[in-house]
Image (cartoon, rainbow, N blue to C red):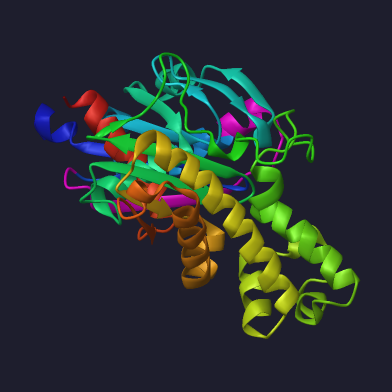
């Protein structure tokens, strides 16, 4: 095998709140191996990093590749990162701070590693291969346990000199509101994330206003997943639908603020909530956003559901590694 052939494989690893997915791609970004492993929440950087290394090694083994046959690895992390240094500045849901992840992985695999925010990766994946493929400016918003945002402008992920940005989940929408995991109050995440929705739905179930939820999940917030919410709405739990629509409207209003700043032509909504009820969620966010923008902005953007599912982030990670190291 020639040196050129050796270096035509790219690897992406996307780390979510409870799972990580590693995929090995060929030169045309066709997947040739994938491995998934669960995480255990705030188990510490060393433990999670060890799991990441094992997952990457398992994926390479399945692909029958040695690390020296990999041209680059891209890793998506839920939180702000210093992309130039490959440092995870903070990952609230993982209890991480200032973790030199690129350095740690480069030591293990002896190939270039780039670290980026997981939603930046997802939006870049949709920009390259999915719902935002034709966009000049693509804004992505991925509501889940938290609410992540990312933006690609003319092929580049928008970021600051040191930090990744577009932390739309931490826009203040309710001054003096609920305490957020980031330490601030009234963040969008406290009102419109899946976790916030589940908390309100649990209250409705306790009051007897959501009988399907009570039957499927009880009042345990962790069990009120996106699919359960969708099933309850389909079964006629009006209180659940009202709670989900309210959260989507709040998110749409926050999206409108970003439209005024960046004027994206495509807004991609992804994550479990969107996948579980795409029509309801996309319509509610789009309607709220269009009502909250200036008249001249109303027809400048469209809101769409992501197309790539779980593969958006991991594909975006690998593609961003390609863009970074194959220029």
Q: 131 or 327, which lies in front?
A: 131
Residue 274 showing in the rendered view: yes
Q: Residue furthest front?
A: 295
Quadrant where the N terminus lies? top left
Note whether 50 is above or below 83 in the view shown: below
* Side of 152 where 195 appears, left or right: right
Which residue does the image show at 19% across and 31% down from the upper left? Answer: 7
- The location of residue 53, given as percent across then percent down, is 50, 33
Which residue does the image show at 29% across and 29% down from the upper left? Answer: 72
- Identify the image quadrant of residue 249: bottom right
* Side of 147 where 183 appears, left or right: right
Note whether 257 is above or below 34 in the view shown: above
- The location of residue 269, given as percent across then percent down, is 45, 55
Q: 260 or 138, which lies in front?
A: 260
Residue 242 forms part of the magenta stretch? no
Which residue does the image show at 77% across and 75% down from the upper left? Answer: 213
Residue 63 showing in the rendered view: no
- The location of residue 60, given as percent across then percent down, is 36, 41
Quadrant where the C terminus lies? top left
- The location of residue 44, given as percent across then percent down, is 69, 29
Q: Residue furthest right?
A: 207
* Side of 310 where 204 appears, left or right: right
Labels in figure, total: 0
Q: 247 or 235, which lies in front?
A: 247
Q: Residues in magenta?
A: 27-50
Residue 31 forms part of the magenta stretch? yes
Note whether 253 is above or below 157 in the view shown: below
Which residue does the image show at 39% across and 15% down from the upper left? Answer: 84
- Identify the image quadrant of residue 75: top left
Q: Residue furthest bottom?
A: 235
- Identify the image quadrant of residue 85: top left
């Amino acid at each position: 095998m020639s040196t050129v052939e050796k270096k035509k494989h790219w690897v992406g690893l996307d780390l979510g709140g409870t799972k990580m997915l590693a995929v090995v791609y060929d030169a045309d970004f066709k997947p040739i191996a994938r491995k998934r492993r669960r995480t255990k929440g705030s188990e510490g950087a060393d433990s999670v990093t060890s799991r990441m290394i094992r997952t990457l090694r398992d994926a390479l083994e399945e692909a029958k590749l040695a690390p020296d046959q990999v041209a680059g690895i891209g890793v998506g992390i839920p939180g702000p990162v210093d992309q130039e240094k490959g440092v995870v500045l903070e990952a609230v849901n993982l209890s991480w701070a200032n973790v030199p992840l690129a350095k740690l992985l480069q030591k293990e695999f002896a190939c270039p590693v780039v670290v980026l925010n997981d939603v930046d990766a997802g939006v870049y994946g949709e920009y390259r291969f999915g719902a935002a493929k034709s966009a000049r400016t693509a804004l992505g918003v991925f509501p889940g346990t938290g609410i992540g945002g990312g933006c690609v402008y003319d092929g580049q992920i928008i970021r600051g000199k040191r930090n990744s940005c577009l932390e739309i989940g931490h826009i203040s929408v309710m001054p003096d509101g609920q305490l957020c995991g980031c330490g601030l109050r009234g963040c969008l995440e406290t009102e419109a994330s899946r976790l916030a929705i589940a908390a309100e739905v649990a209250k409705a179930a306790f009051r007897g206003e959501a009988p399907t939820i009570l039957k499927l999940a009880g009042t345990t917030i962790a069990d009120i997943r996106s699919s359960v919410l969708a099933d309850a709405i389909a079964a006629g739990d009006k209180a659940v639908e009202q709670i989900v629509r309210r959260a989507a409207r709040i998110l749409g209003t926050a999206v409108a603020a970003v439209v005024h700043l960046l004027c994206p032509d495509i807004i991609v909504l992804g994550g479990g909530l969107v996948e579980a009820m795409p029509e309801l969620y996309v319509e509610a966010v789009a309607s709220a956003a269009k009502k909250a923008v200036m008249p001249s902005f109303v027809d400048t953007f469209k809101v769409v559901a992501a197309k790539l599912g779980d593969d958006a982030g991991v594909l975006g990670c690998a593609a961003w590694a390609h863009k970074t190291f194959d220029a």
